[in-house]
Amino acid sequence: MVSSGVSALFDAGETVGMGIPCYPSYRQILKAMSLQVKGLRTDASTGFQPRPDQISDDLAGVILASPANPTGTMIQESALADIAAACTARNVALISDEIYHGLHYDAPAISALQVTDQAYIINSFSKYFSMTGWRLGWMVVPEAHLRVVERLAQNMFICAPHAAQVAALGALSPEGRAELDENRAVYAKNRLLMLEGLRKAGFDRLAPADGAFYIYADISAFDWPAQDMAQALLNEAGVAVTPGLDFDPDEGHRALRFSYARSTEDIEEGLARITAFMARHRK
């Protein structure tokens, strides 16, 4: 879906912006399609989401993600409206990655469709619907772009497999949605455990975990490169975390991404191991 949207919107050589840190595959997809990638540096002051003043005339488009991977942060409606307005003013295409919608905890995520009718919306059954690997999703595009996307889609992937479509109907049923909301309740419990447990272990600079199932931690206070710390956690504690370099080539050596998409028992065990690991290394 992303490749269809990119193909419909941009010509080779054009520049597309995205917040950094970001989902790494988007950078690679854009490069593979002969596009230039411009990282829009984000930080805790804006919830690791891009700012309207970063939408510049050299951009052909911008990709937003809310809730975001790796940070788990969500963009607020007023900020999203300002970014959409900035894109419209500069004729910059807006792609909104809403794949983690449904996985929220304090307040639902805002769709770009709530502030503009000119955005490309990317969504999927992978996350909230627990259908990762089924390669099934949907895209909402402005009506004027519909036929362009249809022509690209029918040549790039034709349609989703029948079995995946049947499974998706099951996920959309009342019974399916009840089960999915139970899954989200587990994530919500895990999230609270992680926020408390990581802080007790010494990780006191965490991105707002608004949605998805990730916590992004700034580890610069430890003076320990992320890839080395992640390797040590795996070797010594048997806990797998992701170095920030996957998401931020420039500053990711100072961050780790933790996922809590497991059972609560696994999260409790993992936190106990992390706490013991940090106690050994902080002596």
Image (spheres, helix red, strand yellow):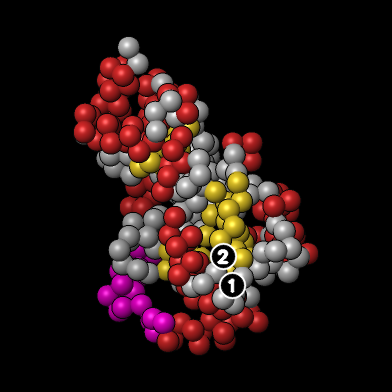
> In which quadrant of the rendered image does the C terminus lie?
top left
In this rendered view, identify the residue nearer to me: 196 or 187: 196
Query: What main secondary structure does the magenta stretch of the protein show?
Result: helix
Side (left or right) of 120 relative to 264: right
Q: Are marks 1 and 2 in contact (CB under 8 Å)?
A: yes
Foreground residue, 44 or 195? 44
- Does residue 120 sit above or below 201 in this rendering? below
Residue located beneath label 1 in the image: 13
The location of residue 149, given as percent across then percent down, is: 53, 81
- Range of the magenta residues? 156-174
> Residue at the location (59% across, 77% down)?
11
Image coordinates for residue 125, horizontal then vertical, percent: 39, 63
Q: Is residue 203 shown to the viewer in this render?
A: no
Q: Is residue 43 above or below residue 66?
A: above
| Residue type pointed to by label 2 | Gln
- Please rate how many residues cluster around mark 2, counting C-alpha atoms within 10 Å: few if below 14, some from 14 to 19, many from 20: some
- Residue 111 lies in quadrant: bottom right
Determine the residue positioned at 56% across, 76% down. Answer: 12
The secondary element bearing badge 2 is classed as strand
First in sequence: mark 1 vs mark 2: 1
Residue 42 among magenta residues: no
Look at the image and tell me whether residue 86 can be seen: yes
Q: Amino acid at mark 1?
A: Gly
Residue shown at 59%/72% (left/top)? 13
Residue drawn at point x = 44 percent, y = 29 percent:
219
* Direction from residue 92 to residue 163 in the image, left or right: left
Disc 1: CA contacts within 10 A as few (<14), some (14-19) or many (>=20): some
Q: Secondary structure at mark 1?
A: loop
Which residue does the numbered mark 2 point to in the structure image? 36
